Amino acid sequence: MRAARPCDAPAPRGFAEAEYVARTKAAQAAMARAGLGALLLTTEADLRYFTGFLTRFWESPTRPWFLVLPAQGDPIAVIPAIGAALMARTWVRDIRTWRAPDPADDGVSLLADTLNEVAAGAPVGTPMGLESHLRMPLADWHRVTQALRGPVVPDGGIVAGLRAVKSPAEVAKIETACAIAGRTFDRVGNFAAEGVPLSRVFREFQRTALEEGADWVPYLAGGAGPGGYADVISPASGDPLMRGDVLMLDTGLVHDGYFCDFDRNFCIGSASAPVRAGLARLIDAVDAAAEAIRPNQTRAADIFRIMDNVVTKGAGGTEAGRLGHGLGMQLTEGLSLIPGDVTVLRPGMVLTLEPGIDMGDGRILVHEEDILVTETGCRFLSPRAGREPVIL
Amino acid sequence: MRAARPCDAPAPRGFAEAEYVARTKAAQAAMARAGLGALLLTTEADLRYFTGFLTRFWESPTRPWFLVLPAQGDPIAVIPAIGAALMARTWVRDIRTWRAPDPADDGVSLLADTLNEVAAGAPVGTPMGLESHLRMPLADWHRVTQALRGPVVPDGGIVAGLRAVKSPAEVAKIETACAIAGRTFDRVGNFAAEGVPLSRVFREFQRTALEEGADWVPYLAGGAGPGGYADVISPASGDPLMRGDVLMLDTGLVHDGYFCDFDRNFCIGSASAPVRAGLARLIDAVDAAAEAIRPNQTRAADIFRIMDNVVTKGAGGTEAGRLGHGLGMQLTEGLSLIPGDVTVLRPGMVLTLEPGIDMGDGRILVHEEDILVTETGCRFLSPRAGREPVIL
């Protein structure tokens, strides 16, 4: 047996059952206020939040998965039989399965029966708002709603609201993911240089992130170009890095089901004066935002304006549409740093600060860090980028 | 500049514009038969199929993305502004954007206006059947449907039907993904052995897959246990491999947006007689299926029964629910090898053969290969596993 390396050191995995119980009871308190007889959840993150059911099998679109949260009592999993063994290892005890896929009845009657039993005609809530999805076929959704004795209504943001405020154990997982990404960024100089194709940089970045301890690397985007890049969501091209390019890598890697999401800029060979000034201004914007945060008082829109005042002198931001967002079980979740989001920042919220600058000629520069809102202000979870550009 | 390695050798990326034109025209011919004024698509794979828009940014659930296929003419992208630069590099010319996220109107009016302009009151089709999702908030979906001048109807499987039959260029990408996974499986002995934690095996497998040329590794599952494993969808535990364990690794890695999906079994230290017999029976089942395939004649259900006769003597399969499935832009897509799927296998279809055996005591063995249905039968895309177990 080989010697254990640091990335194999046992880190606490999952959560204590008490944490799932607390999440369930908090949801049920909000459900009681909203008069809901049950909550119906269909997405990976929402199911995992209340159960701990963690699998990459969601990559397969074939089978729907359901969780029913009753007004009282423990959650009920209504899932394909292929997931029964894994679900049985969570704290969930009431696991109802069908043999999926079944073109004749792919969980529809089992779900409808469960909801009717649990809600008894009272309204069933389900997430319907911004950034929610219904992860099941629309035709089956119509069948389920028609079979219910009561109405289906929006959950009023109950689940998103709970998920937005992280427990200390959740924060620790995000912080571990950030540390893994930080160590990976520190090693970019080992494989990125003038002449190296961007595709190889992306490949080596992912390999390094895994070596540093990432469970998997669901997100890596970036770009490279003279004095800036054209966009921030592209996969790698095969083009080689050129002297004068700014290389940006933005990763969302996962540790125990929780994401980090931040980027780093690297200057190939040299950094021009405009690039130096641009990158410094992005750091200034992040500094200004971090210093301004007062928990239970500052709103998402306030943080947008503070950063926008630095990066576009208050012009209203860029086409990217926001200057940061919530973060946790998903790469992006919850609030958006936009003029129209008046969510008040509360202790335990984790968000990214992600200002961008238009450099002209279709080029932009972006910078991103991850922070935790604390009882007194905020704390950086990502190891901060320095003010001086990193030159490779 | 370092010397290029094989995995950096330029492989043809994307597709010729003619392929997207052909896909669009084929969809429009089917739309005309169904009387549809437009098709509305919301998922990653459906959008990419008609546009070539390839990004990992879908990992973020925040923003919806829409593609409108008119009855005649080219597709119209209705997308967040953050994606405009990348979409402009595809063949799509009509790109309509809004600054997302916008809590007041997150693309709803832009989409409804576009659909009303294009369909002019004729029915708008959208995928609603088995394994389809509507990737947008339900509340916004209701707003869109209410703003339409005509009805929204199921697309009748038009998109799934087109995607099920692969072009030679698509097959080449899947075959490349299979070859990358095959080379990765060949190297498992370098990092998996008695005493090594499963979590390290998973990490090294992903690193090796990237080194062998994978763009990314969205799916890796597996298990290990004495004489078999408990399920096939779990992430890695920290438990070390033990002598007598069967280790199964199942990967869906991506090359240029196309998946492979197959697994390999490894016996740690030794293979017991029941394990040898079980693995041989799984190979026999795959052989029997492959030999039986007659294009335009054999049905998915026939292949299920042929394999089930070998693995459970016709008892009807296991709780996994199916013995294989379609494969391509998604880890699983299209047909299922189940008794109830009477889809006729056509040349160009790519599917997995994935028989499983119950070994008792809650243990199973599974085996999976990827095949292409040809004009005369089928051809293996995955490098076949041998009949003798691989002992590490």
Image (tube, coloured by chain):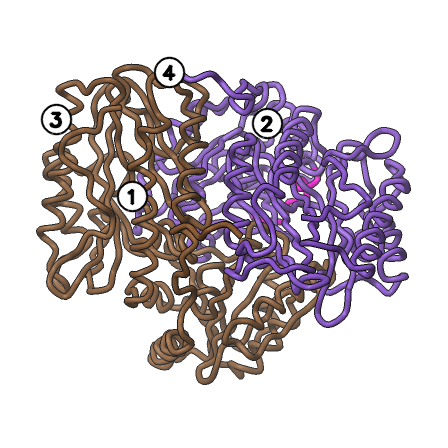
Chain colours: A brown, B purple
Q: Position of residue A13 (x, y in %)?
A: 42, 64
Residue sitting nearer the eye, A241 or A43: A241
Numbered badge on residue A182: 1
Label 2 to label 3, Cα distance in Å? 49 Å
The reply to whether the C-beta atoms of the residues labelled 3 and 4 are less than 8 Å apart is no
Depth-wise, is mark 1 or mark 2 nearer the camera? 1
Label 3 to label 1, Cα distance in Å? 23 Å
Q: Which residue is mark 3?
A: A277
Q: Which residue is mark 4?
A: A195
Amino acid type assigned to the residue bearing label 3 in the image? Ala
Q: Which residue is pictured at 29% across the width and 53% down the height?
A: A326
Label 1 to label 4, Cα distance in Å? 24 Å
Q: What is the crowding at mark 2: few (fewer than 14 residues within 10 Å), some, or many (at least 20)?
A: some
Which of the chains bears the disc numbered 1? A
Q: Position of residue B76 (x, y in %)?
A: 48, 31
Numbered badge on residue B72: 2
Depth-wise, is mark 3 or mark 1 nearer the camera? 1
- The magenta span reads B151-161
Q: Are marks 2 and 3 on the same chain?
A: no
Amino acid type assigned to the residue bearing label 1 in the image? Gly
Q: Position of residue A349 (x, y in %)?
A: 25, 60
Instruction: Name the N-terminal-most of marks 3 and 4.
Output: 4
Q: Secondary structure at mark 3?
A: helix
Residue sitting nearer the eye, A19 or A341: A19
Q: Which residue is pictured at 42% across the width and 17% down the height?
A: B2
Amino acid type assigned to the residue bearing label 4 in the image? Gly
